């Protein structure tokens, strides 16, 4: 198969997954608070959430959500509350102790929920399914292509953001630095809700 037609898809997916948003802010905060190794379940959860969301969009499930406006409002509200709860927890965090085991990092399941409860993720993956439908001969093949593309790209980009958080953890020294950084990361995560309600 000629890979030239896939280039626009891959560019779209890379830009969509590496650009700042709720998932990248969460990966950065987790890397800063818990280190890379303890953030792996979150990164994998987000990547699987995005891959499965892309596959479901390609298979036609997102069309059902778009056909039910009342469900869209419920999804936006639940997703927004969940993101605000995560943002609040990040803002309340203090200076990390990367050696401490008592605090629990954000879980694998929370990573999946972050994507499945995010209408922005649905819109992005539905747009990809509509834009690149001609690349596959069936909805099943498109679901596999989009799922793999979004999942692999998310793993790479979230790992980069997580390492950036870990580097941040090594650079910041005082409790005040951490308070300010955690508030900024929490506010960035909370701000990712705004585009959801402007659609």
Image (cartoon, helix red, strand yellow):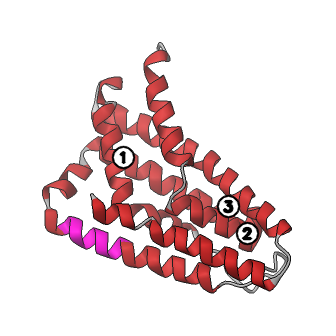
Task: Name which quarter of the figure residue 43 lies in.
Answer: bottom right
Residue 20 image offset from top left, x and y in percent: 54, 55
Q: CB under 8 Å between callouts 1 and 2?
A: no
Which residue, given by chain and number where applicable, does mark 1 sit on? 125
Q: Quadrant of the C terminus?
A: bottom left
Q: Residue at x 35, y 39 (%)?
A: 128
Return the residue nearer the eye: 193 or 137: 193
Kindly state the secondary structure of the residue where label 1 is placed: helix
- Residue lying at 79% horizontally and 69% vertically, measured from the top left: 169
Task: Give the residue drawn at x 30%, y 66%.
Answer: 197
On residue 32, the disc is 2
Pointer 3: what residue? Answer: 40
Name the spot of residue 147 as percent of width and height, x first. 44, 42
The reply to whether the magenta stretch includes residue 178 is no
Magenta region, main secondary structure: helix
Q: Residues within 10 Å of mark 3 (few under 14, many from 20)?
A: many
């Amino acid at each position: 198969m000629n890979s030239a037609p896939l280039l626009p898809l891959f560019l779209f997916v890379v830009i969509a997954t590496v650009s700042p948003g709720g998932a990248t802010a969460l990966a950065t905060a987790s890397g800063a608070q818990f280190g890379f190794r303890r953030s792996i379940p979150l990164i994998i959860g987000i990547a699987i959430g995005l891959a499965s969301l892309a596959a479901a969009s390609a298979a036609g499930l997102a069309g059902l959500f778009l056909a039910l406006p009342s469900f869209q409002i419920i999804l936006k509200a639940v997703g927004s509350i969940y993101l605000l709860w995560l943002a609040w927890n990040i803002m309340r965090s203090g200076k990390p102790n990367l050696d401490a085991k008592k605090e629990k990092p954000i879980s694998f399941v929370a990573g999946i929920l972050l994507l499945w409860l995010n209408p922005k993720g649905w819109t992005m993956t539905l747009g990809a399914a509509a834009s690149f439908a001609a690349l596959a001969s069936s909805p099943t093949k498109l679901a596999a292509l989009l799922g793999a593309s979004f999942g692999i790209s998310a793993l790479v980009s979230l790992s980069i953001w997580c390492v950036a958080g870990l580097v941040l953890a090594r650079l910041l020294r005082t409790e005040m630095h951490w308070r300010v950084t955690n508030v900024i990361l929490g506010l960035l995560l909370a701000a990712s809700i705004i585009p959801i309600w402007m659609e």
